[in-house]
């Protein structure tokens, strides 16, 4: 496979070559105009360029010493300023910034130019005597000194651009991607091992930058690091099928890495057989960032979840099931860490991304994978409830019900199994005591609301049999609890939640047409007080009649709630 060409963001040389060219042109033009004016004023008949063929020895000797000293001074200024900037950037981002700087061809060329200018000035100064004036060498020194003066300011601009956070991160990411693509096609074991080590080192460099940014609460840099690793994974997955089998073997340099050293031989063999060592290492970097940000920068956790979803979707798109399962495993790891930290808000956001991944699978007809995620959602819903965070269980119920609506729309083969999972979300209890179980059930009314909302969806789609399955699961609930659920859902008439959240809408909102069907659903429960008839039924009928105008161009989506 050919090496990956760097994206346009790396082509920064034009950003300073153009100013240099403009300054050179302006300087030369100014000199020629003024010199020409002097030439005309003197009415010099010896020719316009005669002055460059004859030099006054005393003037040249005095001037050369000054020129050489000025060139050396400019070089000292450039080296001093650049050294300070590079050192500050290395302290802020990563020590590898210094290595990147001196590997850049432009930086090496500029530094070499100033050194050569100093050497040229030194030798020309001592070569000039009263009996010998090296005219070509003197003119060359003047040209070199002029260029050195003109490029100083544009070069500083280039250095600042080179060391900007975005460019530093993207250069590391490009290095990793290029090593991965070339190494995957490399037949030489030593070079392949070196490419593996380069990929590993680059990922860890990006992680170091991210963790430093998290410590200083620099969200922009931290987010850039997360996105860079995501881009690396997505582009790698696009070319992975063309890689040689030997690339997926864990080489000597990889085995020396602490993350791989800590693994058992069986785990290493598993990574090799599944050909996912790169994905595993990259997602381990995500896990390290996630744990670091869980207490300092929770917004970054949401970005990590989004990018993990993108990686999983890329794995599905490029038919890499093992890479997908690795991403799912880390999604589960995020949820476990979040629940252990008792961070309900972050769990709410992570579950949103997990559900969106499952919806992508349903649309792609990967029904079994979507069903697997639904099972994990139910499991972590139970864990959240056992940790006395019942709202997490409620969010899980609403997310699975949303998946069920999509599953019905796309005619998924696992809709029945998904429905069974939803109806089991509130079945687990942490106690064998009947009274305790009743108390736990009463606090899970949000789960029942999600199930009741799904029943109205089925009734709207003329799927009474599926709505009856929900009814049979709820028919043994206490009448007062069912009545409370019905009344609370009927009262919510605004889809927009009254606080800002990532899902934008209220969990309990039902479109007017489905709100009207809610009364129909609860009429199936004979024990409920049927005072819904009369004025309330007329109200729901009127609401249903105006549904079309109230719902113009609005697509229903999952909601938020005040408990976040």
Image (tube, rainbow, N blue to C red):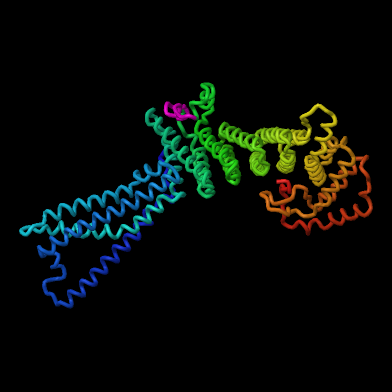
The magenta segment: 246-258
Q: Residue at x 54, y 39 (%)?
A: 289
Pick whichever, 478 or 235, lies toward us.
478
Q: Quadrant of residue 57?
A: bottom left
From this viewpoint, which residue is outermost toward the top? 265
Q: Residue at x 13, y 75 (%)?
A: 44
Where's residue 280, x and y in %? 53, 32
Where's residue 253, x and y in %? 42, 28
Residue 430 in view here: yes
Q: Is residue 381 left or right of residue 493?
A: left
Quadrant in the picture for the N terminus: top left
Q: Quadrant of residue 407?
A: top right
Is 103 one of the magenta-colored residues? no
Where's residue 448, x and y in %? 80, 40
From this viewpoint, which residue is outermost toward the left? 131
How many numbered badges does the structure rendering display?
0
Where's residue 104, x and y in %? 35, 46
Residue 363 in view here: no
Q: Quadrant of residue 21?
A: bottom left
Is 248 one of the magenta-colored residues? yes
Q: Is residue 171 left or right of residue 425?
A: left
Q: Is residue 416 left or right of residue 151?
A: right
Helix, strand or loop for the magenta stretch, by majority? helix
């Amino acid at each position: 496979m050919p090496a990956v060409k760097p994206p346009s963001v790396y082509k920064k040389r034009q950003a300073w070559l153009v100013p240099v060219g403009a300054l050179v042109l302006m300087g030369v033009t100014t000199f020629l105009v003024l010199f020409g004016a002097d030439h005309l004023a003197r009415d010099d008949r010896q020719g316009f360029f005669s002055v460059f063929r004859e030099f006054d020895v005393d003037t040249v000797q005095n001037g050369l010493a000054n020129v050489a000293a000025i060139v050396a001074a400019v070089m000292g200024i450039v080296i001093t300023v650049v050294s300070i900037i590079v050192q500050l950037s290395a302290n802020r981002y990563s020590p590898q910034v210094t290595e990147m700087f001196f590997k850049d061809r432009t930086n090496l060329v500029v530094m070499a130019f100033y050194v050569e200018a100093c050497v040229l000035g030194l030798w020309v100064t001592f070569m000039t005597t009263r009996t010998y004036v090296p005219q070509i060498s003197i003119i060359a020194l003047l040209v070199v000194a002029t260029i050195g003066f003109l490029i100083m300011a544009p070069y500083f601009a280039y250095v600042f651009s080179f060391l900007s956070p975005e460019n530093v991160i993207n250069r590391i990411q490009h290095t990793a991607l290029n090593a991965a693509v070339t190494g995957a096609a490399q037949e030489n074991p030593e070079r392949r091992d070196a490419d593996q080590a380069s990929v590993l080192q680059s990922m860890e460099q990006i992680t170091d930058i991210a963790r430093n940014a998290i410590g200083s609460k620099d969200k922009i840099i931290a987010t850039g690091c997360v996105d860079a690793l995501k881009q690396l994974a997505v582009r790698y997955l696009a070319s992975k099928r063309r890689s040689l089998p030997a690339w997926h073997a864990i080489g000597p340099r990889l085995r020396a890495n602490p993350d791989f050293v800590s693994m058992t031989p069986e785990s290493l063999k598993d990574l090799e057989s599944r050909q996912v060592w790169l994905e595993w290492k990259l997602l381990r970097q995500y896990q390290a960032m996630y744990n670091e940000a869980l207490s300092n920068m929770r917004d970054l956790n949401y970005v990590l979840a989004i990018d993990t979803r993108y990686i999983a979707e890329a794995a599905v798109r490029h038919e890499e099931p093992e890479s997908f399962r690795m991403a799912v495993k880390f999604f589960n790891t995020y949820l476990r860490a979040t629940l252990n930290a008792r961070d309900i808000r972050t769990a709410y956001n992570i579950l949103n991304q997990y559900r969106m991944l499952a919806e992508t699978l349903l649309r792609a007809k990967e029904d079994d994978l979507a069903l697997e995620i639904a099972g994990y959602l139910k499991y972590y819903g139970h864990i959240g409830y056992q940790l006395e965070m019942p709202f997490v269980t409620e969010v899980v119920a609403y997310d699975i019900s949303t998946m069920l609506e999509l599953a019905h729309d796309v005619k998924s083969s696992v809709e029945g199994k998904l429905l069974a999972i939803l109806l089991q979300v509130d079945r687990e209890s942490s106690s064998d005591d009947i009274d305790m179980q009743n108390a736990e059930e009463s606090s899970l009314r949000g789960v029942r609301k999600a199930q009741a909302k799904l029943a109205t969806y089925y009734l709207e789609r003329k799927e009474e049999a599926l709505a009856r399955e929900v009814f049979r699961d709820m028919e043994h609930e206490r009448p007062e609890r069912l009545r409370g659920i019905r009344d609370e859902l009927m009262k919510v008439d605004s889809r927009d939640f009254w606080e800002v959240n990532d899902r934008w809408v209220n969990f309990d909102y039902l479109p007017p047409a489905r709100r009207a069907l809610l009364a129909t659903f609860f009429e199936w429960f004979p024990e409920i007080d049927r005072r819904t008839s009369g004025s309330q039924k007329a109200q729901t009928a009127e609401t249903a009649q105006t549904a079309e105008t109230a719902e113009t161009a609005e697509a229903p989506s999952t909601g938020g709630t005040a408990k976040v």
